[in-house]
Image (cartoon, rainbow, N blue to C red):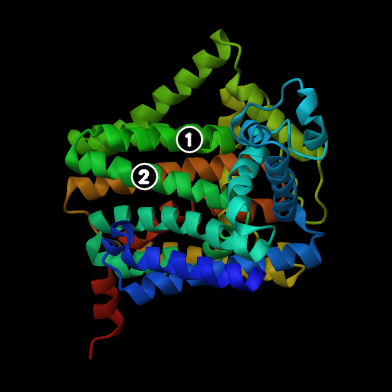
């Protein structure tokens, strides 16, 4: 049955990839679109296999198990299933749901449970087969990455092939976003937000696109609230500088300064202290040691000053590690080689620097730069495990890659090294 469902749904999703205008308008050949999709499916299956046989299943198999518990409620009473999928959590458990909830690990965790909601719906048609579920999870993240590609290539069309290659073939992007986990959903929401924001920039306000942005933003609030929190100032600055292109860098710095002031005011005059929440998250990671991949980073004080003081080291850890001194396994060696590849690209971009003739390009460039750097700093401030850092930073990696790739002057490289 597993093979039968895999073939049927794989074929249907392949037809969607080949026929749906959202994918066709990327102007990529159908064979490329299908190759990228099936590469992600293969990576998702590998993701599940490695976690099952080397990490006792990890979260990815827990998601499948717990979502199956939610799915089973459908056969007892469909209303129970609807309530478990769409209802609130972290509340007094109704007696009629107690037998299901007591078996669910993440009943009190909105982020964990957001994945269960989606996977429980997938269970309705996919059974309890990891490989069949991977088809849908790989497709969701694939939608997001195509949305990012269509956005980036619209502004930097001359670099579209480079952008496509790195977005679709970078190992960490392919691997970490294709299994059953929060990363694939993050890419789906983030890609659609950025794509429809780009459409609004170019074509003006549209209710449909605004609702799509709002829906995905709300889901990100439940799934990974810091992602939407870091996207908002970047989007505000991008919209402002796209419409009024003078002094673009100054405006970006101004928006981020005001965002820091706003975070300070919210922390002082509302029940929600943003800086205390970040400091508590850092303490959580410190208290839950994950083994020899842990690194020594400072605990945070609940203040803006503490975050600013530790930001340089946070960016260093996220951008440059794992380095040679951190390598003690094949997996970490592969992560180090990928990190070195990115650093080599940065060096090439510095030596062979491109220019931006249009203000639209510069506005998008700074959008990607400010979001990726702020994301890397945030991850480096709270995460003290190299494996987790490599996975978390993948969520902002497409934006960092864009800033590097568009800076590279390909013509200058050809002129310098290929004179014949």
Q: Quadrant of the C terminus?
A: bottom left
Residue nearer the viewer, 75 or 237: 75
Q: Earlier in the sequence, mark 1 or mark 2?
A: 2
Does residue 42 show up?
A: no
Q: Residue at x 22, y 54 (%)?
A: 356
Vertical comparison of 194 with 162: above or below? above
Q: Callout 1: few (<14), some (14-19), or many (20+) C-alpha neighbours within 10 Å?
A: many
Cα separation, mark 1 vs mark 2, equals: 11 Å
Q: Position of residue 117 (x, y in %)?
A: 61, 41
On screen, residue 345 versus residue 417, left or right, reads: right
Helix, strand, or loop for circle 2? Answer: helix
Picture quadrant of residue 276: top right
Callout 1 secondary element: helix
Residue 369 visible in this rendered orientation of the protein: yes
**Considering depth in this image, is 87 or 45 the residue closer to the camera?**
87
Give yes or no for contact between labels 1 and 2 (Cβ–Cβ under 8 Å).
Answer: no
Give the number of the disc on residue 336.
Answer: none
Indicate whether 254 appears above or below 57.
above
- Tag 2 residue: 194
Q: Residue at x 44, y 45 (%)?
A: 190
Find the residue positioned furthest to the top.
Answer: 269
Q: Which mark is residue 228?
A: 1
Number of numbered discs: 2
Up-down relation of residue 314 to residue 352 (above or below): above
The reply, left or right, for residue 82 in relation to residue 251 is right
Residue 21, quarter of picture: bottom left
Q: Place residue 414 in its image quadrant.
A: bottom left
Percent position (x, y) of residue 241?
24, 36
**Residue placed at 60% from the left, 17% from the top?**
272
Give the quadrant of the N terminus: bottom right
């Amino acid at each position: 049955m597993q093979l039968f469902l895999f073939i049927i749904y794989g074929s249907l999703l392949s037809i969607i990839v080949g026929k749906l205008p959202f994918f066709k308008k990327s102007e990529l050949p159908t064979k490329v679109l299908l190759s990228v999709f099936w590469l992600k499916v293969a990576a998702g299956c590998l993701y599940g296999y490695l976690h099952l046989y080397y990490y006792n299943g990890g979260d990815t198999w827990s998601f499948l198990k717990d979502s199956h518990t939610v799915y089973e409620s459908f056969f007892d009473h469909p209303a129970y299933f609807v309530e478990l999928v769409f209802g609130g959590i972290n509340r007094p458990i109704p007696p009629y749901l107690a037998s299901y909830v007591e078996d669910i690990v993440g009943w009190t965790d909105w982020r964990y449970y957001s994945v269960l909601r989606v996977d429980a719906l997938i269970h309705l048609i996919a059974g309890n087969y990891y490989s069949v579920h991977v088809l849908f999870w790989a497709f969701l993240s694939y939608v997001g990455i195509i949305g990012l590609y269509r956005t980036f290539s619209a502004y930097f069309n001359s670099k579209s092939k480079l952008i496509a290659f790195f977005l679709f073939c970078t190992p960490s992007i392919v691997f970490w976003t294709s299994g059953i986990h929060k990363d694939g959903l993050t890419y789906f929401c983030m890609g659609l937000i950025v794509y429809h924001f780009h459409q609004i920039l170019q074509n003006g306000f549209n209710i449909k696109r605004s609702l799509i942005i709002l829906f995905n933003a709300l889901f990100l609030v439940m799934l990974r609230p810091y992602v939407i929190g870091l996207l908002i100032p970047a989007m505000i600055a991008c919209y402002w500088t796209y419409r009024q292109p003078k002094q673009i860098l100054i405006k970006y710095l101004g928006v981020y300064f005001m965002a820091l002031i706003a975070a300070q005011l919210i922390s002082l005059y509302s029940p929600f202290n943003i800086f205390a929440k970040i400091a508590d998250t850092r303490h959580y990671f410190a208290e839950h040691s994950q083994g020899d991949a842990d690194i020594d980073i400072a605990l945070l004080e609940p203040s803006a000053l503490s975050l600013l003081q530790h930001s340089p080291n946070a960016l260093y850890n996220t951008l440059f590690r794992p380095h040679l001194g951190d390598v003690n396994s094949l997996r970490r060696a592969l992560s180090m080689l990928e990190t070195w590849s990115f650093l080599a690209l940065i060096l090439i971009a510095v030596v062979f620097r491109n220019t931006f003739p249009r203000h639209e390009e510069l506005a998008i460039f700074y959008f990607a730069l400010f979001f990726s750097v702020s994301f890397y700093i945030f991850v480096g401030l709270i995460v003290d495990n190299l494996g987790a850092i490599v996975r978390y930073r993948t969520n902002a990696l497409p934006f960092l890659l864009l800033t590097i790739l568009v800076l590279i002057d390909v013509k200058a490289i050809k002129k310098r090294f290929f004179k014949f």
